[in-house]
Image (cartoon, rainbow, N blue to C red):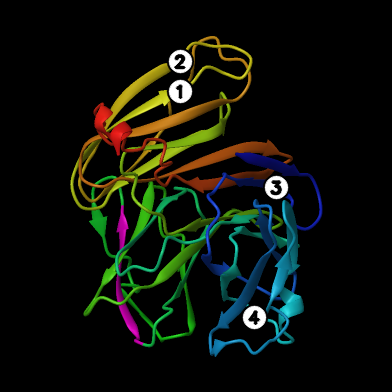
Amino acid sequence: QQTTEVAVGAGRGLLGITCAAPDTQFWFPGASTASGRSDYVHLTNPDDSAAVVDIELYGKDGPVASDAGEGITIPPYSSEPVLLSTLTDAPQEDLTVQVSVRSGRVGAAVQALDDKLGGDWLTASADPASDLVLPGIPKDATSVRLVVFTPGDTDADLKVQLATPPGLITPAGNATVRVKAGMTTAVDLGAITRGEAGSLVLTPASRPVPVVAALGVVRGEGDKQETAFIPATRPLERRATSADNRAKGSTLSLTAPKAAARVKVTASAGSEGGTPASKTYTIKAGSTQDIAPPVPSGLKGPYALTVERLSGGPVHGARTLEVAAGGVPAFTIQTLPDDRGTVAVPRAEQDLSVLQK
């Protein structure tokens, strides 16, 4: 986990990002080249040979014509930031960014910086799917913007629901959204949570069509506003971890969109001392629950939270971290996909006959 506090200027506030595995394809709905916004795609090559990357942009009218994003070479063991506004002449308020790797593999993330609304890291959406969950909308969010894109050649009709503490509800005026093939669609949901924990659940309204999606979330009013992003995230199959938590300001948001689930939350010792603590929670089907996570006794320094699914249906989660920053509600949100911290070990038996072959 990397957490950065920016005191003034573009992107002022709290920016956070978790480690992610390198890959060959990424989708970032929610990027922008609008006036006052500076978005950079950071490309990192972890290997000992060069990687070649293509960046394609999709706006409200479809693909954005540009050759500048083709064939970008990332040297071994290095990182390159690419300013999105250099890839297009016309400003676009809502963009979907596709990062495709021709050779090698890279890690990728978008750093979104706004002159007035702060900023944060926008991580990749889960792979295109017909059912998506975007967990962890803060209950005091003053503005929520949904950005959706379908990479195929078929339009998508999506049913929009909000998973709240009592259960699933349909937001007034936003029961469905139509996403044209190859075009980025944005919907202003306003203060959708209305003081309660919430997560957005997207399902097919008719036939299933794979899509990617992300939320832009704003907290605060006037010149004291801050931004964070929530991409669609994979379910937590066994275990997920959030590394940088503080004694105050950390909130876990857990969603069980289909069936009730039991989860165990464990707080590690702090970086400078403390005793681990655990607690078990039950998340009702179709609901979102905000949890003030357990804090290690005698805590000194930041600590990690590990969320384990013990039983029941799929669970999606996010962690919100808040800090005081001169009246600005500085915050950052990281989703909690499975950390793939366990592997299947094949059963092996001794067979000395192989020495005779």
Kindly identify which residue carries mark 3.
13
Rate crowding at label 3 as few (under 14), some (14 to 19) or many (20 or more) other CA atoms within 10 Å.
many
Foreground mark, 2 or 3? 2
Amino acid at dot 2: Pro
Do the residues under discs 1 and 3 have CB atoms within 8 angstroms?
A: no
- Rounded to the nearest whole Å, what is the CA distance between mark 4 and mark 3? 24 Å
- Residue 92 is tagged as 4
Measured as percent of width and height from the top left, residue 187 is found at 46, 74
Q: Which of marks 1 and 3 is nearer the N terminus?
A: 3
Q: Nearer the viewer, residue 121 or 236?
A: 236
Q: Which of marks 2 and 3 is nearer the N terminus?
A: 3
Rate crowding at label 4 as few (under 14), some (14 to 19) or many (20 or more) other CA atoms within 10 Å.
some
Kindly identify which residue carries mark 1.
267
Answer with left or right where residue 278 lies relative to residue 69: left
Disc 1 is placed on an element classified as strand
- Residue visible at 48% across and 64% down? 214
- Rounded to the nearest whole Å, what is the CA distance between mark 2 and mark 4? 47 Å
Kindly identify which residue carries mark 2.
276
Q: In which quarter of the image is the C terminus?
A: top left
- Rounded to the nearest whole Å, what is the CA distance between mark 1 and mark 4? 42 Å
What stretch of residues is rendered in magenta?
154-163
Q: Which of marks 1 and 2 is nearer the N terminus?
A: 1
Do the residues under discs 1 and 2 have CB atoms within 8 angstroms?
A: yes
Do the residues under discs 1 and 4 have CB atoms within 8 angstroms?
A: no
* Residue 156 counted in the magenta span: yes
- Rounded to the nearest whole Å, what is the CA distance between mark 1 and mark 2? 5 Å
